[in-house]
Amino acid sequence: MRTKFQILPTSPATQDLETEREFGLSHSSFKEELLLFNLIKNGKVSELKNKMTEYFSKEIIMGRMTGNSERQIKYWAVSTIAVAVHYAILGGLDETDAFNESDKVIRKIDSIHNFNDPNESQEIFSILQEEAVNLTKKVYSAKEKQGKSKIVKDALHYIHLNLKERITVSDLAQYCSVSTGYIAKKFKKETGYKINDYILKEKLESAKLYLSQGKSIEEVAFELSFCTESYFIECFKNQYGVTPKKFTNSFTDDSGVDAPAVTPTESLESWLQSSALSTTLRALYTI
């Protein structure tokens, strides 16, 4: 399905409304856009897919933001992503992950240049739809983890941001302005994990990603601040039942034998997700 779009005619800034009246055109409905953003915020994946199919089957009318045709659609796409990401944060998605996701998609949009080819503009619409679904799925997952106290949420956020460092219970207690005993008890009660066990679990999840990307065992152990390479290997095998070397070999095995599953509930998507702290854009939005 190809998405049709139209840009409002050029006019002096003070005559925009008159021009819209003359041509019988106006921006696409805010009400429809708000519905889509709220579906992202509420983690409603199936409903979002249905409403997006309906929305993108209509002609999209966007305001003229520049005289440059390439920048025009990019500006529109970037502003759309920015608002969507903020709604995802309002829905419970970790802000670091959300902003990082925004940056990644904006770079992808920025890499498109040949707008004389109709397929290039269609690619932007496809990117927006894919990202909307991706954000909504992440919000849904985040909502499943909600119900935690602010202290534990802050602790999880700190671990998420500093996973490559050596994190101690004292670090978390200081960050959350509570005692070590209190944070340890609160964390265990709400997550089901002792703090050190949770940190180790998260480090090993990241280790799988780095190994699948081709990093060496030594590099991964160092990058995730394991005290020694041998300790990393021991922890990895205890968690997944295979050594890091065997796990890495499973990605290059040409024998035709299926690679062994590391965990029965893991999806490829979770292996390929990464995070970084960066943001290039903020937008106004309506709660």
Image (tube, rainbow, N blue to C red):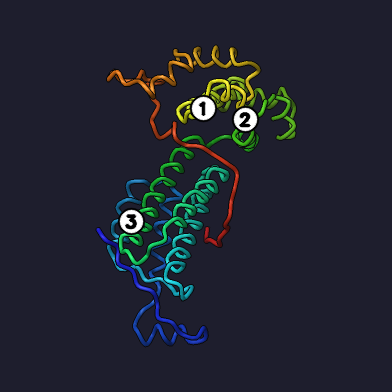
In space, the residues marked 1 and 2 are separated at their CA atoms by: 15 Å
User: Is residue 180 toward the left or the right of residue 274 in the image?
Assistant: right
User: Is residue 211 toward the left or the right of residue 133 in the image?
Assistant: right
Image quarter of residue 276: top right
Which residue corresponds to the image point at 38% horizontal and 58% vertical from the top-left?
Answer: 124
* Rendered location of residue 38, percent (x, y): 44, 54
* Rendered location of residue 274, percent (x, y): 51, 37
In space, the residues marked 3 and 1 are separated at their CA atoms by: 39 Å
Q: At label 3, which amino acid type do we have?
A: Met
Q: Mark 2 = which residue?
A: 164
Of marks 3 and 1, which one's residue comes earlier in the chain? 3
Crowding at mark 2 (Cα within 10 Å: few <14, some 14-19, many 20+): some
Which residue is more in the foreground, 212 or 264?
212
Camera-near label (3 vs 2) is 2
Q: At label 2, which amino acid type do we have?
A: Lys
Q: Mark 3 = which residue?
A: 52
Which residue is more in the foreground, 124 or 120?
120
Q: Quadrant of the N terminus?
A: bottom left
Q: Mark 1 = which residue?
A: 215
Q: Which secondary structure lies at badge 3?
A: helix
Crowding at mark 1 (Cα within 10 Å: few <14, some 14-19, many 20+): some
Q: Which secondary structure lies at badge 2?
A: loop
* Rendered location of residue 156, percent (x, y): 60, 33
User: Is residue 56 toward the left or the right of residue 215 in the image?
Assistant: left
* Rendered location of residue 107, percent (x, y): 49, 53
Q: At label 1, which amino acid type do we have?
A: Lys
